[in-house]
Image (cartoon, rainbow, N blue to C red):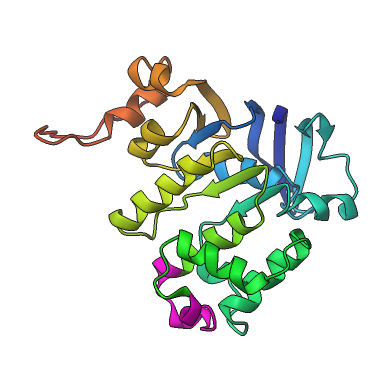
Amino acid sequence: MLEIQGLTIKFRDGKETVTAVSDVSLTLQKGETLGLVGESGSGKSVTALALTRLLPEPPALYAKGDVLFEGESILKKKKTALRSIRGREIAYIFQDPANSLNPVFSIYEQLAETIRLHRPEVQNVRREANFWLEQVGIVNPEKRIDHYPFQFSGGMQQRVMIAMALSCRPKILVADEPTTALDVTIQKQILDLFRTLKSEMSILLITHNFGIVRGLTDKVAVLYRGRLVEFGNTETVLKAPQHPYTRALIGCVPHIGQKLVRLTTIDNL
């Protein structure tokens, strides 16, 4: 379904060039959920945005490698061709819903625009929009759908963004920390929804939560300083991590009844 081949991405800042992602290779199969983990700044979101060339060029520079979607190169496609892929084929749930939702349009207007653009076959757009709001746990969606983003809490805005992405019924869903702003009850509901959708779409899940990684993903990839340091089946990686960075990340996860004087640290990797 998706293949990243030796991808290297750099950013130019005046005369200086910084490498954000270096020689990353990953695969995502149909119906598979892949977890992408690593500390902040490790290159997770940059890698995800590169899948549909959402990084602005400049300052971003696709220096090396390729991204293949169903066997075709994304990086070689024209911008007009990319518009038909973004949303309909590969949809995103972004980290910051407050910056992703337009404050001057109602929730319905924004959901309706997405559905009409990517699923023109839908006849009753309002009913479809209500359906997805209900799926992500919005109470009384028929009433709330005409409200504006400022009338929603941060967690509810995040749920709207999830509904917007899922309403496209994409082949690949890229979820960048989709449950960060949600309470644990809604988190479970969203993750259960992702599980039911696994037969319909592949999921690239960016997260810091190893509990979510263990419970939802089939494979996991670990990024460190823009490089892929470990990639494999989730249970194998979590039970027997090979790279010291992966072991350190897992070692930082607290356990009930465990007393730690200091968190696990790494030196000179």
Q: Residue at x 61, y 85 (%)?
A: 104
Residue 269 seen by the camera: no
Residue 170, image x, y percentages: 67, 48
**Closer to the camera in the image, 188 or 26:** 188
- On the picture, is 90 further left or further right than 217? right
Residue 177, image x, y percentages: 47, 50
> Is residue 86 a member of the stretch shown in magenta?
no
Question: Which quarter of the image is occupied by the C terminus?
Answer: top left
Residue 146 seen by the camera: yes
The relative height of residue 135 versus residue 226 in the rendered view (above or below) is below
Count of number-bearing discs: 0
Residue 22, image x, y percentages: 65, 30
| Range shown magenta | 142-156
Q: Residue at x 71, y 28 (%)?
A: 3
Q: Residue at x 27, y 35 (%)?
A: 253
Q: Residue at x 71, y 33 (%)?
A: 8
**Closer to the camera in the image, 17 or 163:** 163
Residue 4 in which image quadrant: top right
**Closer to the camera in the image, 34 or 18:** 34
The relative height of residue 168 versus residue 77 in the rendered view (above or below) is below
The relative height of residue 214 versus residue 242 in the rendered view (above or below) is below
